[in-house]
Image (cartoon, rainbow, N blue to C red):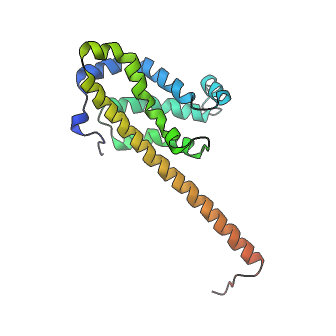
Amino acid sequence: MEDMCPKEYQLNVQIENLLTEKKAVILKKWFELVIETYPSDTAIFIKREKDPFANPVGNAIYRALEPLFDELLNKMDHEIITSFLDPVIRIRAVQTMFTPSQATSFILFLKYIVREILNKEISKNNIYDQLLKFESKIDELCLAAFDIYVKCREKIYDIKANEERNKIYSAFARAGLIDESL
């Protein structure tokens, strides 16, 4: 298993403890901000509907955020990160309302949230260097999300191209323009 995080990005116990202590608040705010990227009617539905079958988008997002946050606190195992990022990014890749940056930028919201929630503790304990290391890990997570997004979009374009090719072939075949003897 490949660790995405270089040793210099490993967190010290002080900031890790603060992040763990405030984890529930951070995750709640992160989920809210991700949901706000959707149109208001959709956002309201995603927040209210708890049934995973009626609300697969909200369920995928909700189920992914905590394990992703945990990996940011740990070694950032590529396989684990991909397994939780993939469902969320796949959904956002097919939703045409999002540009590539909008589809993946929800990860960067975590920087804002952590600074907002831990501002006093970071200042009081003078651990800005540790905050920067944590933010570098968030950047790595965002890049992994972008890689997944690109693969999903490539697959969508391949499917569309194959569909068009098959339509053209079928039209030519119906018109008798294709020699089947070849």
Identify whether 32 is placed above or below 163: above
**Rendered-image quadrant of the C terminus:** bottom right
Identify whether 101 is placed above or below 120: below
Identify whether 169 is placed above or below 2: below
Identify whether 77 is placed above or below 166: above
Q: Nearer the viewer, residue 89 or 112?
A: 112
**Rendered-image quadrant of the N terminus:** top left
User: In x, y percent, where is residue 150?
Assistant: 48, 50
Q: Residue at x 35, y 16 (%)?
A: 119
Report how many numbered discs are placed on residues in the image: 0
Q: Is residue 110 left or right of residue 76?
A: right
Q: Residue at x 55, y 45 (%)?
A: 93
Q: Is residue 13 left or right of residue 175?
A: left
Q: Is residue 67 left or right of residue 137?
A: right
Q: Residue at x 64, y 31 (%)?
A: 39
User: In x, y percent, where is residue 65?
Assistant: 46, 30
| Residue 145, quarter of picture | top left
Q: Residue furthest right?
A: 175
Q: Nearer the viewer, residue 104 or 14?
A: 104
User: In x, y percent, where is residue 7?
Assistant: 22, 37
User: In x, y percent, where is residue 172?
Assistant: 72, 76
Q: Residue at x 31, y 42 (%)?
A: 4
Q: Residue furthest bottom?
A: 181
